[in-house]
Structures are given as C-alpha cells and as structure tokens.
Image: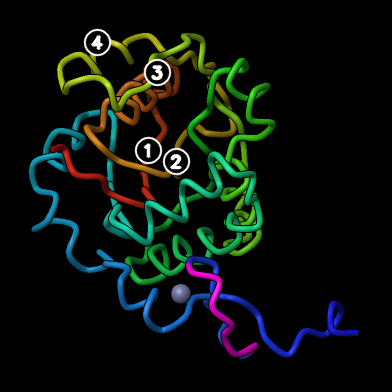
Amino acid sequence: MELIFPKNIYCINCDKPISRQNTLSLCNKCYQNIKFLYDKNVSYDKEVIELLKSKYIDDIKIATIYDEVMKNLIHKIKYSQKTYLARYFASILYDLICKNNIDFDFISSVPIHKKRLMQRGYNQVDLIVKHLSKFTKKPQISVSKRIKETKDMYTLHLKERNEEMKDAFESEYDEKLSGKTLLIVDDILTTGATALNLCKAIRNKNAKTKIKIIFLSRASLK
Ligand SMILES: [Zn+2]
C-alpha cells in the first residue's frame, strides 16, 4: 500500500522526504535556492534580450537562473531519463505565462535533430510543452525541423555559436498560423543563437505570425 498511497513524496532535487501537500515537489531549502526571474528579466538579461529582440521575435521571458538546483534538475531530464520532471518544469513555465499575461494561440518546442532524438529517445522540451499545452488549453504544433546536426554548444564561443546555428532549422508556411501568435518553448538560454535562428526560419516562411519565446532557465555566458 505504501507504493500506491505514499505518506511522503520526495524532493525532486535532493530526495529528502517532503509532505504530500507540497505541490511543487521541492523541499523548502531547494525551492529557496531557485532564483526565479518572473519580474526581473529585463534588468538581469538586458544584453541577451536586446540581441533576441529582433524583427523575428516579439517577446522573450525567462523563468529561472541556471544555477545549482536548476542545473541539477535539467541534467536529470536531459541525461538521466527523469522524464517525470517535464510536468514540474511545465508548472514553472505556466506560472511565468500567467504572471506575465503571455497571450498566444499555438505552442511549440525547439526541435532537436532526429539523430539526437534517437539517442535520447525523447525531446525533453517537447515533453514539457505537452504538459504546458494541457495547462494552457492551447494546441501544440510542429512548425520546424532541425536539419543540421550541431556541435555541443557549450564548447563554442558566442560568435561560433551563431555561425554553428545558421541554417540549422527549416520551416514551412502554415496557413493556420497566419495572423496568430506562436509561443516557442526552450529549456536553456545561453547566447540566444538557437532561438534566434529558429524564429528566423519560422518567420521567413510565416511573415504574418507573431513569435514569442519563453525559456525555463538562463545560463551565464561566462
Ligand atoms: Zn530538496
């Protein structure tokens, strides 16, 4: 019975038992260590927001800072098959959407290359978007493909990243997107090269579509 009706659940970061009433699934200590950026995007990320606020992207918001706790959690979903975390990340992003009144018609993830999809078995952002689509009652769509196998970005500098991401995505015209707003979801924002090149590919084929993007976490450029 313990398995079906556990008295306690465990902190998704440090595995310490926590009360079942704890809807965030984090102990107080871990929760307090997450730096939420709900109202602080502009001041913290001026540089990268300016870079991304191009003619391709209409709005950018970031939920958290990529430090110890977030790093650990995102690594778990990316490299340790802890796919149950997708729901938790979706609830953080849902909070971000509600607090900022982000309005949109369709929701989509940043696609990964099919080779990487085969290796990992899933696109973690896609799993997050599935939950987010349910929370927001907005349909999830696929508007682009990753056609270039890109190197691991953390080995590259800002300029190299942008070069590496050039023409990495391919998009098609989608009639239902005309005059509508598309919300793109990504997990980690570093230089913005991935986001910028993806939104550019979509906008080039869908000129009458507004594109907004939200990130789960913001990594430092250093
Ligand atoms: Zn904890």
The label shown at residue 61 is: none
Q: Would you say residue 114 sits in the magenta stretch? A: no
Q: Is residue 19 magenta?
A: yes
Alpha-carbon distance for marks 3 and 2?
A: 13 Å
Q: Name the N-terminal-most of marks 4 and 3.
A: 4
Where residue 211 is drawn, which disc sits there?
1
Q: Residue 83 appears at what percent x and percent y?
A: 64, 50
Circles 2 and 1, Cβ within 8 Å, touching? The answer is yes
What is the CA distance from the residue labelled 2 to the residue labelled 1? 7 Å
Q: Crowding at label 4, few (<14), some or many (≥20) Cα neighbours within 10 Å?
A: some
Which residue carries the number 4 mark? 163
Q: Which mark is residue 201?
A: 3
Indicate which disc, 1 or 3, sits on the residue closer to the N terminus. 3
Query: Along the line of sight, which residue is nearer the eye, 111 or 150?
Result: 150
Separation of marks 1 and 3 at Cα, in angstroms: 11 Å
- The span picked out in magenta is 14-20
- SS at circle 4: helix
Name above or below for residue 89 compared with residue 118.
below
Q: Where's the C terminus, which quadrant?
A: top left
Which amino acid, mark 1? Ile
Residue for point 37% across, 51% down: 71
Mark 2: which secondary structure?
A: strand
Residue that carries the numbered disc 2 in the rendered image: 184
- What amino acid type should be assigned to the residue bearing mark 2? Ile
**Separation of disc 4 and disc 1 at Cα?**
22 Å
